[in-house]
Image (spheres, rainbow, N blue to C red):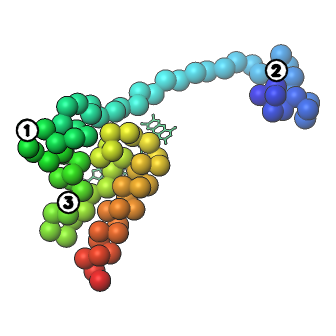
Amino acid sequence: MVTLFADAGMDPKRDIAGIVLNRWGHAYCNAGPGFYTPKDGKPTPSDLLRTPLGNLTFGHSELNGNQHWTIAAEEGHRAAQQVVAMLT
Ligand SMILES: Cc1cc2nc3c(=O)[nH]c(=O)nc-3n(C[C@H](O)[C@H](O)[C@H](O)COP(=O)(O)OP(=O)(O)OC[C@H]3O[C@@H](n4cnc5c(N)ncnc54)[C@H](O)[C@@H]3O)c2cc1C
């Protein structure tokens, strides 16, 4: 904050009364054996979930085993494209 705001007059001793740090857990799916590559001749869970079920498609960051916004957007985009393909 000093780096950002000292030039604007910020003085941490004067302007900061306290700092509260909260921790909020970040769940991750367990990408164990068979998650990324087929195991025992079975498709991976994510391959199954990326296959439309009737007119339903699935998009979630957990399909990639890497729960972040960018993956959520990629998977959501892919699922939306699958719906568009059904409609055209
Ligand atoms: C504490 C925390 C911090 C994070 N920090 C970061 C970060 O700094 N950077 C980053 O890139 N990512 C971060 N993430 C991860 C990121 O938020 C997720 O990967 C992303 O939001 C997942 O998006 P999604 O659309 O795949 O799923 P979600 O955001 O989980 O969306 C799923 C939606 O489906 C809805 N839903 C569930 N069941 C049903 C149902 N039966 N019918 C209808 N709707 C349903 C839910 O209500 C929800 O709105 C963080 C996550 C957490 C928890």
Mark 2 to mark 3 CA distance (whole Å): 54 Å
Q: Disc 1 residue type?
A: Asp
Labels 1 and 3: the sequence-earlier one: 1
Q: Which mark is residue 40?
A: 1
Tell me the element at label 1. Answer: loop
Rendered view: 27 above or below 21: below
Residue drawn 36% across the image and 55% down it: 75
Which numbered disc, 1 or 3, marks the residue closer to the eye?
A: 1
| Mark 2 vs 1: CB contact within 8 A | no
In the rendered image, residue 52, in percent from the top left (x then y), is placed at 20, 63
Residue drawn 24% across the image and 56% down it: 50
Q: Nearer the viewer, residue 18 or 42?
A: 42
Question: Exactly how many numbered labels are in the figure?
Answer: 3
Location of the N terminus by quadrant is: top right
Q: Is residue 9 left or right of residue 29?
A: right
In the rendered image, residue 60, in percent from the top left (x then y), is placed at 33, 50
Residue drawn 31% across the image and 55% down it: 59
In the rendered image, residue 43, in percent from the top left (x then y), is placed at 14, 48
Q: Which mark is residue 51?
A: 3
Labels 2 and 3: the sequence-earlier one: 2
Q: Is residue 74 left or right of residue 38?
A: right
Which numbered disc, 2 or 1, marks the residue closer to the eye?
A: 1
Q: Which mark is residue 12?
A: 2
